[in-house]
Image (cartoon, rainbow, N blue to C red):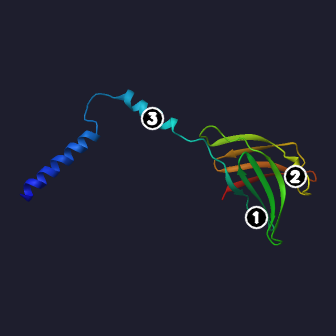
Amino acid sequence: MKKLLSLALIGALSLSLTACGNNSSKDNSSSKETTTTKKEEKKEPLDLTGEWQCDPTDGTYLKATISNGVIEIDWVFVEENKSAIYWVGSYDAPTTDTNEYSWVSNNDHEQTETSILASTDETKEFTYNNGVISFSASMQGVSKTFELKKQ
């Protein structure tokens, strides 16, 4: 009886595996293309929302937050346990899944006008490339490119 039950279970398993697989020897390329296309359509756009920061230098670093169509960047002073606004501006989210993206952010002067360390630029270009957001900042005639990584 056990042997008969075991044979029945093996037979049922074999049938279910055969039903899941493709036992046809014909080239089924149109079916494969459709599957690939569907997978590509399901890719989500690149999501840059969240916390970003650069490596600290001399106890200071930049920390960015991207959310709700806004990018805010603050100078963080580790020893003083303080921060100051550097940039608050628009953020246009990517609409495709990509490893490279750039956007021009418009300064929200209402948010930046009271910070003495805030950029006075009208716009700032941000570039995302393989896990790093970069932008250029100038102070007293010296420009530097900052690179922020997601936290």
Of residues 14 and 70, the one drawn nearer to the viewer in this rendering: 70
Against 107, residue 117 (above or below) is: below
Pointer 1 local density, CA inside 10 Å: few below 14, some 14–19, many at least 20:
few
Residue at the image position 42 percent from the left and 30 percent from the top: 34
Q: Which residue is mark 3?
A: 36
Residue at the image position 34 percent from the left and 29 percent from the top: 28
> Where is residue 14, by image quadrant?
top left
Judge left or right: residue 62 versus residue 122: left
Please name which of the two marks, 3 or 2, marks the residue nearer to the observer.
Answer: 2
For badge 1, the amino acid type reads Pro
Disc number placed over residue 112 in the picture, else none: 2
Residue at the image position 56 percent from the left and 42 percent from the top: 44
Give coordinates of residue 79: x percent, y percent. 81, 72
Q: Which residue is mark 1?
A: 56
For badge 2, the amino acid type reads Thr
The Cα atoms of the two marked residues, 3 and 2, are separated by 47 Å
Give coordinates of residue 137: x percent, y percent. 84, 50
Query: In the structure shown, which secondary structural element does the residue marked by tag 2 occupy?
Result: helix
**Number of numbered labels in the structure image:** 3
Give coordinates of residue 77: x percent, y percent. 82, 67
Quarter of the picture holding the N terminus: bottom left
First in residue order: circle 3 vs circle 2: 3
First in residue order: circle 3 vs circle 1: 3
